[in-house]
Image: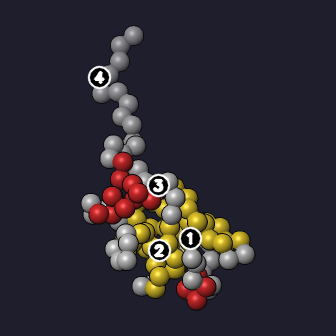
Amino acid sequence: MAGSKGGWQPTVPSNPCERVNFRANINSPQPAVLGPLGITTELEVKLQTAPTISVIVEYMGDTAGSLTGTQVAALINCIQNGYKYSATIVSIDKGNYTVQVSIK
């Protein structure tokens, strides 16, 4: 059979920082910030460097909480290399917030 030489090309980015996409719980959720927010609200993912390096989520400049988990070390590295991420609220259960982290 004859075929084209071009072939199928995967659409998955080759850079791991461009493939970041995972769910995480917000730790130390701040009720004053998160309380009025609902599902699908987008939060900004930022790096906090003091007192230790951590990943936080903000809404309109106010800290909503922090993210931890197995993917956070890679996320820190990517943010330090200039990548920007958002965290969309996907679940709220009695003050527990789950977000979907992805590249902006």
Kindly check if marks 4 and 1 are in contact, taking CB atoms under 8 A apart as contact.
Answer: no
Q: Which residue occupies the extreme top position in the image?
A: 1
Q: State which tag comes first along the sequence, 4 or 1.
A: 4
The residue to which callout 3 is attached is 71
| Residue at the image point whose x is 46% and y is 85% from the top | 62
Asked whether the residues under the numbered discs 1 and 2 touch, taking CB atoms below 8 Å apart as contact, a structural biologist would say: yes
Is residue 104 visible in the rendered image? The answer is no
Q: Using the image, determine if residue 32 lies above or below residue 72.
A: below
Question: Reading the chain from its start, which is encountered first: label 4 or label 3?
Answer: 4
Residue at far right of view: 94
Which label's residue is closer to the chain start, 3 or 1?
1
Residue type marked 4: Lys
Residue 85 occupies which quadrant of the picture? bottom left
SS of the residue under disc 2? strand
The residue identified by callout 4 is 5
- Cα separation between marks 4 and 3: 38 Å
Task: Give the answer, above or below, for where 31 lies relative to 42.
Answer: below
Q: Which residue in the structure is indicated by mark 1?
A: 26
Q: Amino acid at mark 2?
A: Val
**N-terminal of the two: label 1 or label 2?**
1
- Quick one: SS at disc 3? loop
Task: Report the Cα–Cα distance between label 2 and label 3.
Answer: 15 Å
> Where residue 84 sits in the image (x, y, percent)?
35, 65
Q: Is residue 11 visible?
A: yes
Q: Which residue occupies 37% across, 69% down?
A: 53
Q: Which residue is mark 2?
A: 57
Judge left or right: residue 76 versus residue 37. Answer: left
Give the distance between the C-alpha atoms of the residues marked 1 and 2, in whole angstroms: 8 Å
Q: Residues within 10 Å of mark 4 (few under 14, many from 20)?
A: few
Q: For the residues carrying marks 4 and 1, which lies nearer the camera in this image?
A: 1
Q: Amino acid at mark 3?
A: Gln
In the image: residue 83, left or right of residue 20: left
